[in-house]
Image (cartoon, rainbow, N blue to C red):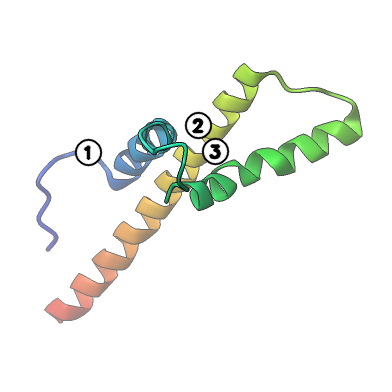
Amino acid sequence: MIDRMHKIPPFVDGAIFGLLFLPMAFFLKLICPLSEGCFVDPFFVLLFSPLFMLQSIFDKVGFALSTREEIVFISVFWSVAWAFLAHLGSKVLRTQYARMEE
């Protein structure tokens, strides 16, 4: 049986991490010196790639996104993505523990 240290479901933990992922990346970018490259730079391409896809769809329709809407979309997207990954990870761990107990 899986020992749980807290009662929060894994998908909620993933959603909270997804919400904190964007400010954490920006903070790491802020503390990097300007004269050198930052190790966070490659992650920004991945971080904003869903936004590029959404903007291309909205450009075809003729709708423009404001900065506030972009930030909300990125936050919600990564929150849902991490919640889904955490949920899948907990399912995989439960099945592995169940197989080990047999």
Give the Cα distance between marks 3 and 1.
21 Å
Q: Which mark is residue 8?
A: 1
**What is the x, y in percent for residue 9?**
27, 43
Cβ–Cβ under 8 Å for marks 3 and 1: no
Per the image, label 1 sits on a secondary structure element best described as loop
Q: Count neighbours of disc 2 (C-alpha within 10 A) and say few if under 14, some if 14 to 19, many if 20 or more.
A: many
Q: Count neighbours of disc 1 (C-alpha within 10 A) and say few if under 14, some if 14 to 19, many if 20 or more.
A: few
Left/right placement of residue 61 relative to residue 86 reads: right
- Write down the residue under mark 3: 77
Per the image, label 2 sits on a secondary structure element best described as helix
Residue 97 sits above or below residue 89 on the image: below
Q: Nearer the viewer, residue 97 or 70?
A: 70
Residue drawn where x is 73% and y is 22% of the image:
65
Give the Cα distance between marks 2 and 1.
20 Å
**What is the x, y in percent for residue 48?**
60, 41
**What is the x, y in percent for residue 44?**
54, 44
Residue 69 sits above or below residue 45 on the image: above
- For residue 14, which quarter of the picture? top left
Q: Nearer the viewer, residue 102 or 83?
A: 83
Left/right placement of residue 50 relative to residue 99 reads: right
Name the residue type under label 3.
Answer: Phe
Query: Which of labels 2 and 1 is toward the front?
Result: 2
Name the residue type under label 1.
Answer: Ile
Give the Cα distance between marks 3 and 2.
6 Å
**What is the x, y in percent for residue 96?**
25, 74
Query: Which badge, 3 or 1, is on the more N-terminal residue?
Result: 1
Residue drawn where x is 70% and y is 18% of the image:
66
Q: Which mark is residue 75?
A: 2
Name the residue type under label 2.
Answer: Ser
Residue 92 sits above or below residue 45 on the image: below
